Amino acid sequence: HAALSRALGKTWEAERVDHHSACWGKPESHRDDDYWGLLQTARLFHAAAPGYPAHRLLGFSPHSPAAHARLIETDWQFASQHADEWQRDFAESPLVMRAFAQHYAKAGDAEATQRCLSAYLKRSPDLWAYRQLAKSYLQQNDRENWKATLDEFLTQEDYGLEHARVRVEIANYFMDQQEWEQAQPYAEEAAETWAEWAMLCAVRCYRGLVNEEQEGAWLGRLLERYTSRNHAVNYFYWCHRTGLGDADVAMQILEPFLAAEQGGGSGAGSQFIYLAANRRREALKAFQSQIKKDGIEPSTGRFYASYIALLAWELGETEAANDALKLLSAEANNFALVFNLYKKFRDAGEGAKFDVDEARSIIKDLSGLGRLNVSFFAARLMELAGQKQDAVEFYRIAATTPDTQLHVNHCMARQALRRLGAEIKGDDLKQAAKGG
């Protein structure tokens, strides 16, 4: 190639384009017009002025839908002069109605877009047109016609998974609005196809409905059909969060991944899996490795150091716990405040109590993950101090913190409450799921 380029000269690559255009034009300028030839060239070239292929095609075949559609697409200045006439004459031509609809959609003319798409759909009930018509209604906050349009598509023949995809679109819209009951029939029917993305939609819906049995049923089916680390992890945590299902099935799938991660393989989160499985020594080792690798960085370091201190104390490794507490206390933070309350209790000796009132004041103004995590660690430290009733109070705060139900400490708090005979149910579960 290099030798050929040198032989042809430095400008040959640019010149060959010019030569091609010139050569293409010579036969075109001498050939007689014919419909198929003009149709092909009209699709290739922009019809910016009379004399270009689309105009020639229109002159050759005045009733050609393809000519009118191409002029709508490429020469709106000309087509706009005939828009009313063409929409009347070609009302039954999907090709022309599609061109008009797409032009009006780009121009932001919702009424004209909807009119032309409706005409198109009478002759060609295609998914793209239903979607575009539904989108146009939704942009006008017309939810009734948005839903009616997509529901109408569901009455058409299904040639694959198109119906399932539309049902997922509808369900996702309602779930984004926190309207879980509206989403449920669409999510459920889509999931019956056993497509992975459809079953994930059902999982999300039933989680929002706080129907943990159905959430777990679909998580189990996902794991059965699409065995993977992610689906095993999700089913595993659901088992430990709810006390339902068979966590051992998921753990058997996860063990090879966990072994690879211990050996330096790719993957993340093994420490949390060990936590949920109550394999505390393995969890401690994994947290220590992570801290050694990343240090105490703001987003996760304090969280990891908190678990190292907690697990080390639970396992009787006081020196490791104190070292983690020093790292945790290097800068002021709520985790350190709670853990220093426990250290103060330990240092005070026999007869001392963990200061529950002080712990309440620490979490008083917290929300979200901060409230979940600090409350959970306070509860676990209270339980370690032998104050189980106080621990239940704080476990409940952690387990009912809104929009945290997928966090590992929500799972751990629910586990602890079941173990202590204080499992949350009903409205408390709905409080935890608030926000989706």
Image: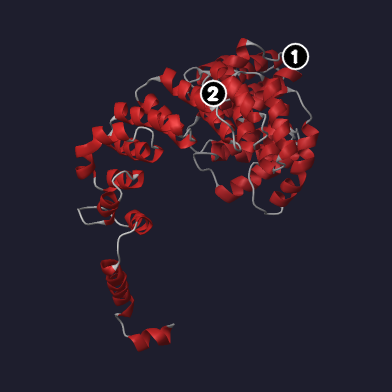
Image colouring: secondary structure
Task: State the image coordinates of residue 282 (x, y, percent, origin top left).
Answer: 74, 41
Which amino acid type corresponds to the residue marked 1 in the rendered image? Gly
Element marked by disc 1:
loop
Image quadrant in which you'd find residue 139:
top left
Quadrant location of the C terminus in the rendered image: top right
Picture residue at 60% right of the left edge, 49% below the top: 292
Nearer the observer, 264 or 201: 201
Locate residue 397 relative to residue 144 in the image: left or right.
right
Nearest to the observer: residue 345 or residue 93 = 93
Q: Position of residue 130 (x, y in %)?
A: 45, 31
Disc on the earlier residue, 1 or 2: 1
Please give the count of numbered marks on the rendered protein: 2
Amino acid type at circle 2 is Gly
Could you tell me which quadrant the N terminus lies in?
bottom left
Secondary structure of the residue carrying numbered label 2: loop
The residue that label 2 is drawn on is 436
Residue found 64% across the figure and 29% down from its top: 191
Q: Is residue 207 visible?
A: no
> Which residue is disc 1 drawn over?
421
Instruction: Please tell me in which quadrant of the rendered image residue 121 appears.
Output: top left
Establish if 382 lies above or below 200. above
Q: Is residue 335 left or right of residue 350?
A: left
Badge 1, how many Cα within 10 Å: few under 14, some, many 20+? few
Please state which of residues 272 and 132 is positioned toward the viewer in this rendering. 132
Estimate the x, y position of residue 360 in percent, counting from the top left. Answer: 54, 16
Callout 2: few (<14), some (14-19), or many (20+) C-alpha neighbours within 10 Å?
many
Residue in view at x 55 percent, y 19 percent: 180
Which residue is rendered at x = 56% and y = 48% of the image?
294
